[in-house]
Image: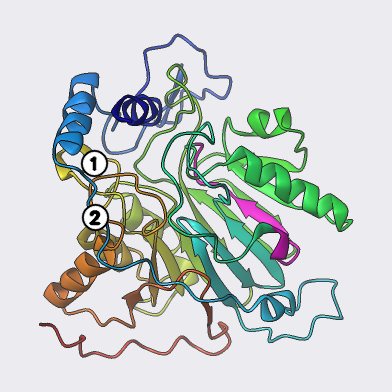
Amino acid sequence: MFRKAFALAALGCMAAAHAASNPYFDPEKAHHTPTGFRNNHVESVRQSLPNLVRWKWNAWLNGLPLPPQAPTPAVAADVQALAGYPRHGSPASHGPDAPMLTWIGHATVLVQAGGLNILTDPIFSERASPVQFAGPRRAQPPGVALADLPPIDVVVVSHNHFDHLDKASVVQLKALADQRSGTTVFLVPLGVKPLLQSWGIESVQELDWWDKTVVQGTEFHFTPTQHWSARSLHDAEETLWGAWSVFGPTLHWYFAGDTGYSQDFADTRRHFQERWPEPGTGFDLALIPIGAYEPRWFMQRQHVDPAQALQIHRNLGAQRSIGIHWGTFPLTDEPLDQAPKDLQRARCEAGIAQQAFGTLAIGETVLLPPRQAPMAPSPAAPEVCG
């Protein structure tokens, strides 16, 4: 078991040196390199092989991660309500036109806003792994089965790690769109398009940092984060990674994907500040990772902890944030139920209300006020902290 876990961690956490050339290389862009891409504010966040061995050995000796004290909360999704959201060109839809958000699990979220059904980093497979006979196993089923999803207009992918870009899931999404005589547009970072095309997916657009594309009146901007990419031992940082800043008529929202803490979030808010002329405002909603952060000495540069997630929430000027990337796959040393506890502690220390930054149950849907009706301000008083 340890050998399997170590092999998968080695595949997912580091890669060997390579001499590949970067076909997208632009010497005027600081995050481009002749062989791939790099972060804005630090060099590579990848760890050395000795550090990887140290981490996995210590985890094995100490039986980490410990089992959760309670299962990740889950509720039965209201599939009929999701199907009723009024999409562009679907007059038969009967649901509200207010934005809706459903957590499916890990970093997979269904955002229904601006007449579009948008899916983030889809993974519906049993394991977050290049193979389905080994690797981190899902702790509970997806909150919405892939076959029960409403027609998906857009899929956004933050980077190519296996827990964020799952081949089986995106291939099935494309097949489902074909069966329904529709089209799903896949928006991906630079370098990822050829991979999806090799899987038979043609409706793909790839974007560099600060690039924009528009789908039926909604703007999708690809923006910087601090992370890395790889799907083998020999392709580290050959493709780009990042976040999605999405501006639709009823919702301005942000999807961080997977990231360490950096100045990139403050930079993103400044870049789009003219969209929010009121002082102290920013995104209506931010989806921010809060899990996969222990041990800090190993994860610090590539995965935020809940306290840093709160800082991202503030940097973005988000009116509301929801914690994702936790409670689904046992990827690191903390128990699956630890992230919400640490988030609560960090909120209390920061004096931030639970309504401003909380979590959802898997399968839970929340209705959000459209932009025409301003976001209700979060209560000034924080939750009662023990």
Amino acid type at image mark 1: Met
Q: For mark 2, what is the residue?
A: 305
Q: Please provide percent x and percent y for residue 80.
A: 71, 79
Find the magenta span and give its range: 147-160
119, above or below 295, in the image: below
Q: Residue at x 39, y 29 (%)?
A: 8
Mark 1 vs 2: CB contact within 8 A: yes
For residue 179, side relative to residue 108 (left or right): right
Relative depth, front residue between 145 and 294: 145
Q: CA distance from mark 1 to mark 2?
A: 9 Å
Q: What type of secondary structure mainly makes up the magenta span?
A: loop
Amino acid type at image mark 2: Asp
Give the colouring mode of the picture.
rainbow
Indicate which disc, 1 or 2, sits on the residue closer to the N terminus: 1
Residue 120 location, quadrant: bottom right
Q: Please provide percent x and percent y for residue 100.
A: 58, 77
Mark 1, other Cα within 10 Å: few <14 / some 14–19 / many ≥20: some
Relative depth, front residue between 298 and 374: 298
Rendered image: mark on residue 299: 1
For residue 124, side relative to residue 61 (left or right): right
**Can residue 264 be seen here?**
yes
**Residue 261 covered by magenta stretch:** no
Mark 2, other Cα within 10 Å: few <14 / some 14–19 / many ≥20: many
Q: Please provide percent x and percent y for residue 184.
A: 75, 52
Q: Residue at x 68, y 56 (%)?
A: 154
Q: Please provide percent x and percent y for residue 356.
A: 33, 79
**Residue 151 covered by magenta stretch:** yes
**Can residue 248 be seen here?**
no
Q: Residue at x 62, y 84 (%)?
A: 98
**Secondary structure category for the residue under label 2:** loop
Relative depth, front residue between 259 and 28: 259
